[in-house]
Amino acid sequence: MMSTKKGLQQETLDPALRVRPRVRWGVLAYFLYIAVFYGIFVLNGIDYKQVGESERTLLLGYVATLSGGAVLTLTVVTIYGWWRPALLEWRSLSRWTMTFPIIMAVIAIVNMLIGDFTRVTPLMWLYLIIGSILVGFNEEMIHRGQLIVALRSRFGETGVWLLSTAMFAVFHLPGMFLGLGAGALFQVVMAFGLGSIFYLARRSTGSLVASMFLHGLWDFSVFSTHNSSFHLAGILAPLLAIAAAITVPIILRREKRRDSMKRVQEN
């Protein structure tokens, strides 16, 4: 699974990178973020299932935790100097792979159009907007940004997708001890599938900004409709997640095959 692509070597040798990309540095950023995010969550004493119910739970369980995470994320990325390779994709996938991200965005938007917002106050809307921007930036920069840059220094693209997405899924596991109970296991599985779509958003558009926007939009849709009796996202998300988890390795296998054929033809 070792990568020998010229583009990755150039990323590694770029003098703008203060820290040479290595798997251990991406993993360090990952665990530091977990420590800060969940540390603040525990200190604030919020039940995970209550986030989105009130101004207080949104402030303490969403905005505060993500604000602390943002400080950590900005610090780590600046120290590493990995802004460019984290934000810009060295090679985009075929445009048709945008299908999953587009479907996910449509589900999020429709979910909001039919949602019940009668109990959402103006201050809650403000917290939802701030929190959604932060979650998109933080979690994508750590998982689809720093981890991808680090993992590409050692693994091929299938391994990069699998490991970064699996770590994104495991990131949600502590919810088991913060109010979700066994339901956190379902969230972990869902996170793997949806994380695969966020990966496609980055690879298909050539920019991490696309996955940041999609991630923020999805969370905004979910938390803003927390009190609704009908959740379209909750119904369709499992199907979309399963389809994406199955499709991504097929896409990457075909990409690898095309690259191999191209190298043979060039030689």
Image: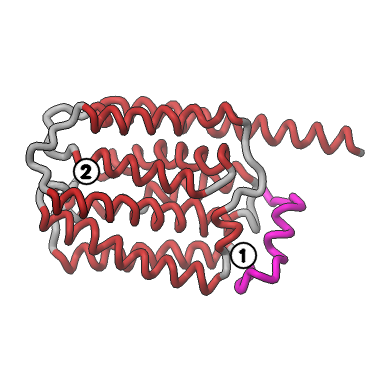
- Residue type of the residue flagged with mark 2: Phe
Please say if 230 is above or below 158.
Answer: above
Which badge, 2 or 1, comes first in the chain's sequence?
A: 1
* Label 2, label 1: how far apart the Cα atoms are: 35 Å
Q: Left or right: where does residue 200 sit relative to residue 177? A: right
Q: Amino acid at mark 1?
A: Pro
In the rendered image, the vertical position of residue 228 relative to residue 160, given as above or below: above
Q: Secondary structure at mark 1?
A: loop
Q: Which residues are magenta?
A: 1-20
Residue 223 circle label: 2
Residue at the extreme right of the image, as rendered: 267
Residue at horizontal 52 percent and vertical 28 percent from the top: 247
Q: Are marks 2 and 1 in contact (CB under 8 Å)?
A: no
Q: Provide residue 195's location: percent of width, then percent of height.
A: 43, 42
Q: Nearer the viewer, residue 65 or 172?
A: 65
Please say whether residue 68 is one of the residues in the magenta stretch: no
Residue 38 position (above or below residue 172): below
Q: Residue at x 16, y 40 (%)?
A: 226
Residue 14's image quarter? bottom right
Which residue is pictured at 28% across the width and 27% down the height?
110
Residue with the mark numbered 1: 21
Relative vertical location of residue 122 with respect to residue 250 in this rendering, above or below? below
Label 2: element kind: helix
Which image quarter is the C terminus in? Answer: top right
